[in-house]
Amino acid sequence: MSKSVERVRQAAIAAGLDIEVRQMADSTHTAEEAAIQCGVTVAQIVKSLVFQGANSGDLYLFLISGPRKLDLEKASKLTGEPLHRADPKHVRKETGFAIGGVSPLGHLIDIKTYADESLMRFDIVWAAAGGTNSVFPCEPKKLAAAAKAQIADIIL
């Protein structure tokens, strides 16, 4: 198990969340690939998107359903500043995760997190566990609580 996957497991334990990390045989880099590997709809895949504040330089994490797109205007209102996609190298350095394996849990830094309310309609969602082929299933409300995410309408 990689260091980043173990960090996710430990963060889940610390948050009182019981997860089972699953290592998939093929890529889960995209929501579509993850859905195939997990045997669920793309909507049940949690995309972890990292954006950077244009004024503060702070990183923000947005958890959204696989086929959905983040509404930057809504997200900017929540964070109080304009946002842009964070550079992948900066994301890896600050969070400890590479793009495609960014987990809702286990970041190297405290990161303000927002979860889209549309995820809450599912009994189970699947999220990245710190590696491009590592995922875990979880109840969305428990995941949002463990990630200290504010639940909001953040999609187009």
Image (cartoon, helix red, strand yellow):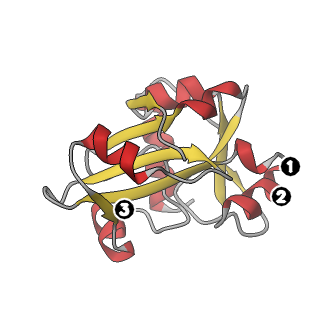
* Disc number placed over residue 96 in the picture, else none: 3
Task: Name the side, left or right, on which 91 lies relative to 3.
Answer: left
Label 1 Cα neighbours within 10 Å, binned few <14 / some 14-19 / many ≥20: few
Image point 46% across, 68% down: which residue? 98
Q: Position of residue 96 (x, y in %)?
A: 36, 62
The kind of residue tagged 2 is Ile
Which is more N-terminal, label 3 or label 1? 1
The furthest residue to the left? 56
Task: Name the side, left or right, on which 133 lies relative to 36.
Answer: left
Residue under label 1: 39
Q: Position of residue 133 (x, y in %)?
A: 66, 63
The kind of residue tagged 1 is Gly
Q: Quadrant of residue 124?
A: top right
**Relative depth, front residue between 11 and 83:** 83
Q: CA–CA distance between discs 1 and 3? A: 28 Å
Image point 55% across, 47% down: which residue? 156
Secondary structure under tag 1 reads loop
Which is more N-terminal, label 2 or label 3? 2
The kind of residue tagged 3 is Gly
Label 3 Cα neighbours within 10 Å, binned few <14 / some 14-19 / many ≥20: many
- Contact, mark 1 vs mark 2 (Cβ under 8 Å): yes
Q: Is residue 78 above or below residue 24?
A: above
**Relative depth, front residue between 87 and 71:** 71
Residue under label 2: 36
Q: CA–CA distance between discs 3 and 2? A: 26 Å
Q: CA–CA distance between discs 1 and 2? A: 5 Å
Q: Position of residue 3 (x, y in %)?
A: 45, 60
Image point 83% across, 58% down: which residue? 36
